[in-house]
Amino acid sequence: MASLVGPTIFTNHLREAGDNHTTEETGHLEEAFASALLVSISLALLAAVLAALAVSWYFSRRVQRSIDSIAEAASQIATGHYGARVSDPGLGQEFTTLALSYNQLAEKLETTEATRRSMLGDLAHEMRTPLATIDAHLEAVEDGIRPLDEQTLGVVRGSTARLRRLAEDMAALSRAEEGLHLTLGLTDAVTVAATAAETARDRFVAAGVHLDTDLVDAGRVRVDAERMGQVLGNLLDNALRHTRANGTVTLTCRRIEDWVEYRVSDTGDGVSAAHLPHLFDRFYRADTSRDRRRGGSGIGLAIAKALVEAHGGGISATSSGVGHGSTFTVRLPSQP
């Protein structure tokens, strides 16, 4: 198109400039112009193609290296090496987002795998003690060292009850974390707390611990009343285990801005600052020997956390230190 249109435009410019060449001379000029134009366009086209090939090769190599790094990291994760990460290739926002999303996925898988290993180790540790107790007593009975009396059967029953409670707690935690079905309904916030307090009161009386309530009208919450009662029950049981006789546990309910807040405070053992961030982890105990002796499985707070988050709320723990009691706070969105 340049060779066809260019000479004509060139001749018109010559005429406008007052050129007096003959027709033959003008034809030679047009031919020279067309030839120069064709050569220059050909050279420009060749340079453009070479430049395009070079740029395409450069970027394709960068893209290929980025994809290869992601593929290699994915292969490492597939073989169980969850620490593999990819760097930002610097090829634009899309590739940056891809690398960031991949690293987040790898980090989540690494955390999940670490949690799984920790949970299996903790579960094995929890099962080892009652199983060892059962095995030792049965072996003693077989060897004639101990009689198969009510005391021996009581020890065996206690160990099997502990295993059953552990299995039930694990099943409850699994359902809560996997998103169990909640039957939500509008419920008076004070009613939920009062019901939980009345359910637990007999246990407090038996242990010689005072259970006080400070329930202020806080409006309504949209909750599964049974599950939220389980949450407050777990918190009250936890406070009871860590509060000595004649101590006090207080359950409060009040409204703070757009939230309904439940608090379970005790005058018991308290928690050091180092333990506070881990209280809601599976099987975690601030005082291992004391909790085992009192029957805690280390799962109740993890179940409470999962259930509260399933309701769209949050749970936290505070303490002034060992010997100064502790406070667990549950916050749920209030309803009109």
Image (cartoon, helix red, strand yellow):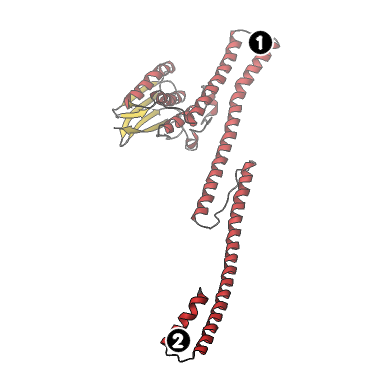
Image position of 143 (left or right of 304): right
Give neighbour class at mark 2: few <14, some 14-19, many 20+ (Cα, 10 Å): some
Task: Locate residue 316, reporting x and y percent.
Answer: 42, 35
Which residue corresponds to the image point at 68% horizontal and 13% vertical from the top-left? 140
Marks counted in the figure total: 2
Question: Where is 283 relative to 151, above or below?
Answer: below
Please report whichever mark, 2 or 1, sits nearer to the chain's N-terminal start. Answer: 2
Hey, which quadrant is residue 158 in on the image? top right
Residue 40 is marked as: none
Q: Foreground residue, 8 or 273? A: 8
Task: Locate residue 52, reporting x and y percent.
Answer: 57, 66
Do the residues under discs 2 and 1 have CB atoms within 8 angstroms? no
Task: Locate residue 212, reporting x and y percent.
Answer: 35, 23
Q: Amino acid at mark 1?
A: Arg
Residue picked out by circle 1: 146
Q: Foreground residue, 39 or 32? A: 32
Secondary structure at numbered mark 2: helix
Question: Where is 74 relative to 250, above or below?
Answer: below
Image position of 112 (left or right of 135): left
Q: Amino acid at mark 2?
A: Leu
Question: Where is 30 relative to 235, above or below?
Answer: below
Residue 14 is marked as: 2
How far apart are the two marked residues, 2 and 1, measured between alpha carbons? 125 Å
Image quadrant occupied by the C terminus: top left
Which residue corresponds to the image point at 68% horizontal and 14% vertical from the top-left? 139
Q: Nearer the viewer, mark 2 or mark 1?
A: 2
Which residue corresponds to the image point at 52% horizontal and 47% vertical from the top-left? 101
Secondary structure at numbered mark 1: loop
